[in-house]
Every structure is written in structure tokens, then in C-alpha cells.
């Protein structure tokens, strides 16, 4: 035990040891009722404000959506947003700490240079370990999460941000419970221009867009 403590607080491992102590302090606080388990949860859904004045702005927004979607996809792959943030951090820190202790004991022999060189590989392996360990927890927390209810878009009034026609998809903004949501829409009969209001009457679930009717003035 004394040898493990010496290794844990040696220069190559001290950062991971401090992080592990912080994580342990967090869980002690949770068990004592001082903190809620979801206190440090993060929302990785990216809300993007859209203000389209010219056609080129639509291309910029599309590129930004791809970038944001890619980042969100990476975070979701590692179960962030599916499992509480601090559970993921606990397994990640614990894994990095254990790998650092073993590597520096058997290979690095206390070398700070070796510890720095191994940081990225350590992080990569620990992320995969965390992914594997937390994946069985995803359905458990999904069943426990009752905070989000599905939004019923049918019958909602929306404002067109990009013109829509029976043949071309547009984009519309819907206000639901004080939040502005963006949806892809297609007009049912005639073109609906940007800035005009429409009524959502149907959903095409296969292609993920809504059918809208223009609201006459």
C-alpha cells in the first residue's frame, strides 16, 4: 500500500491522482446529499440561431450544422448525454490513473518525459474503456429519464426561415414552451416564402420533414 501511495503521488502520476481525489470527493458529497448526481451534467445538443438574409447564408448554416453534428456524434459515441457526466468522468479518470500507474512503474520508471509522451495514448485507451464500461448503463438511465417529452409539432404555427414549396424543402422556426426549434418543412400546395407563417399539418417520418399549409392573412 505504501508503495502504491508513493507511486500515486510521484510527479508522473500526481495530476491523475488529484483528479481521482476530486472525483472521490464528488461522490462522497453525493452520498451525503450535498450534491445531486446530475449537478455537472452537460447538454451537448447544439442550438443554432438562424438568420437567413441571402442564399449564401443557408450554405454557411449547413456547414455549421455538419460541424456541430459531427462533434455531437463523437460525444454521443462515448455516451456523453446518455449517461450522467460524472459517471463517465469517474471511469475515465480511474482508467487514466490506473494506466498511468502501471506504465510508469513497469516502463517509464518515473520519467516525466515518458508520462507526457503517453498522455494521448492513455486518453485514447481510457476513452474506449469508458465507452465499453458505460454502455450497459445507457438503457438504465434512458428508462429513468422522464424529463424530456416528445414535441407534438402537428397543429403548431411556424415561421418560414427558408422558402418551401411542394417540391423543395425549406426550414421553419417553431416556438414550443418558450423554446425556438428548427424543422425541415415542405409546402402542401403552393410556395410559402421566407418570413410567412404556416401551419404544420402532417409529418413525413421516413424523410424527417413536416408538411405545412400557408396561413392566409
Image (cartoon, rainbow, N blue to C red):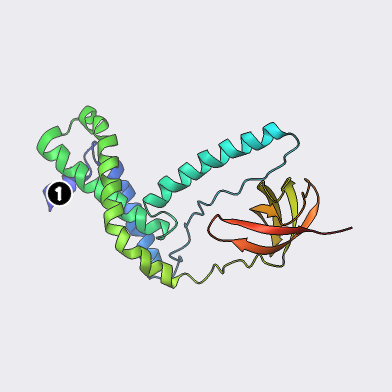
Q: Position of residue 185 (x, y in %)?
A: 66, 53
Viewed as shown, does residue 130 lie left or right of 46?
left
29 left or right of 189? left
Percent position of residue 88, x then y: 35, 55
Residue shown at 50%/51% (left/top)? Answer: 44
The residue at the far left in this view is: 106
- Residue beneath the point at 36% across and 63% down: 138
In the rendered image, which residue does mark 1 sit on?
Answer: 4
Image mark count: 1
Q: Residue 140, position in %: x, y?
A: 36, 69
182 vs 147, nearest the viewer? 182
Q: Residue 198 location, x and y as percent? A: 77, 57
Most distant residue in the right direction: 217
Closer to the camera in the image, 110 or 59: 59
Q: Residue furthest top?
A: 113
Determine which quarter of the picture holds residue 178.
bottom right
Any part of residue 211 in sight:
yes
Neighbor class of circle 1 (other Cα within 10 Å; few <14, some 14-19, many 20+) is few
Q: Split into 4 quadrants, where in the image is the C terminus?
A: bottom right
Q: Is residue 17 visible?
A: no
Residue depicted at x 79% and y 55%: 197
Left of 160 or right of it: where is 110?
A: left
Question: Secondary structure beneath disc 1?
Answer: helix
Residue at screen point 12% across, 47% down: 3
Q: Nearer the viewer, residue 14 or 141?
A: 141
Amino acid at each position: 500500500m505504501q508503495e502504491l501511495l508513493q507511486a500515486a503521488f510521484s510527479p508522473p502520476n500526481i495530476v491523475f491522482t488529484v483528479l481521482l481525489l476530486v472525483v472521490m470527493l464528488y461522490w462522497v458529497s453525493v452520498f451525503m446529499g450535498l450534491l445531486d448526481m446530475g449537478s455537472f451534467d452537460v447538454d451537448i445538443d447544439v442550438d443554432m440561431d438562424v438568420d437567413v438574409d441571402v442564399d449564401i447564408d443557408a450554405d454557411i448554416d449547413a456547414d455549421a450544422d455538419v460541424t456541430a453534428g459531427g462533434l455531437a456524434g463523437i460525444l454521443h459515441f462515448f455516451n456523453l448525454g446518455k449517461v450522467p457526466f460524472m459517471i463517465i468522468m469517474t471511469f475515465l479518470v480511474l482508467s487514466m490513473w490506473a494506466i498511468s500507474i502501471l506504465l510508469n512503474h513497469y516502463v517509464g520508471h518515473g520519467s516525466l518525459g515518458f508520462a507526457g509522451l503517453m498522455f494521448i495514448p492513455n486518453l485514447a485507451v481510457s476513452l474506449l474503456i469508458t465507452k465499453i464500461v458505460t454502455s450497459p448503463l445507457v438503457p438504465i438511465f434512458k428508462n429513468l429519464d422522464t424529463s424530456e417529452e416528445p414535441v407534438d409539432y402537428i397543429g403548431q404555427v411556424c415561421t418560414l426561415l427558408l422558402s418551401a414549396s411542394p417540391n423543395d424543402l425549406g426550414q421553419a422556426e417553431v416556438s414550443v414552451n418558450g423554446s425556438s426549434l428548427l424543422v425541415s418543412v415542405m409546402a402542401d400546395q403552393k410556395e410559402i416564402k421566407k418570413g410567412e407563417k404556416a401551419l404544420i399539418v402532417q409529418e413525413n417520418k421516413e424523410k424527417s420533414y413536416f408538411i405545412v399549409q400557408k396561413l392566409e392573412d
